[in-house]
């Protein structure tokens, strides 16, 4: 019985320590995700100060080019998502309304709390007179310079 227990212990050790591929894959994924720890400025307690509109038509509209508001490590992630959305206005300056549709889309991040990927939040945004809602993907784990997506203006 002792031999079987010892054999199981050895097999467990070999299996747990023998995974070079996953460590290499994790390192490669994190290298792809640049160091993203940009410090944002606030307009007020509920709104980020944003001064630029994106020229890239995918900014915010695709998981691969999500808006990076940061703050998760300081328990400010959801508040930062709202601060970002509060800084936007519709194409003619209309006040926007939004709701969180849920989480999706694992993306590599060196700021992941577990593993090497984080989930994005998907917000549905609309304004008076719009024909439909718009999906905006937001990353609360990484932060980079904020811009308004194409089609939006700034408050």
Image (cartoon, rainbow, N blue to C red):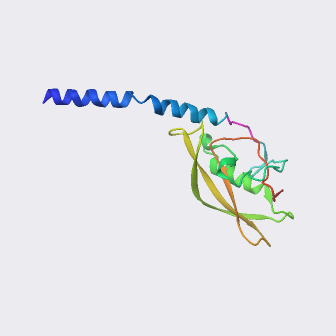
What residue is drawn where x is 36% and y is 31%?
16
Reply above or below: 20 against 101: above
Reply above or below: 32 against 89: above
Indicate the position of residue 7 as horizontal and vertical percent values. 22, 28
What residue is drawn where x is 32% and y is 28%?
13
- Can residue 86 be seen here? The reply is yes
Indicate the position of residue 35 as horizontal and vertical percent values. 67, 33
Q: Which residues are magenta?
A: 35-40
Indicate the position of residue 48 as horizontal and vertical percent values. 77, 49
Closest to the observer, 113 or 13: 13
Which quarter of the image is occupied by the N terminus?
top left
- Can residue 46 be seen here? The reply is no
User: What secondary structure is the magenta-colored segment mainly?
Assistant: loop
Q: Is residue 22 left or right of residue 129?
A: left
Q: Is residue 133 left or right of residue 9?
A: right
Q: How many marks?
A: 0
The image quadrant of residue 38 is top right
What residue is drawn where x is 42% and y is 30%?
19
Closest to the observer, 71 or 153: 153
Reply above or below: 73 against 133: above
Which quarter of the image is occupied by the C terminus?
bottom right
Farthest residue in the left direction?
1
Farthest residue in the right direction?
92
Indicate the position of residue 106 as horizontal and vertical percent values. 56, 47
Q: Is residue 69 magenta?
A: no
Farthest residue in the front direction?
21
Q: Is residue 39 magenta?
A: yes
């Amino acid at each position: 019985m002792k031999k079987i227990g010892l054999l199981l212990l050895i097999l467990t050790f070999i299996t747990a320590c023998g995974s070079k591929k996953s460590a290499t894959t994790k390192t490669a994924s994190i290298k792809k995700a640049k160091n993203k720890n940009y410090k944002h400025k606030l307009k007020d307690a509920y709104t980020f100060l944003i001064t630029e509109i994106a020229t890239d038509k995918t900014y915010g509209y695709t998981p691969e080019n999500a808006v990076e508001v940061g703050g998760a490590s300081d328990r400010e992630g959801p508040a930062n998502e709202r601060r970002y959305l509060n800084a936007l206005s519709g194409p003619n300056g209309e006040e926007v309304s939004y709701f969180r549709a849920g989480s999706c889309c694992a993306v590599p991040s060196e700021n992941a709390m577990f593993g090497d990927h984080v989930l994005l939040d998907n917000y549905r945004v609309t304004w008076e007179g719009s024909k439909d809602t718009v999906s905006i993907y937001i990353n609360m784990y990484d932060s980079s310079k904020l811009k308004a997506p194409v089609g939006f203006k700034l408050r």
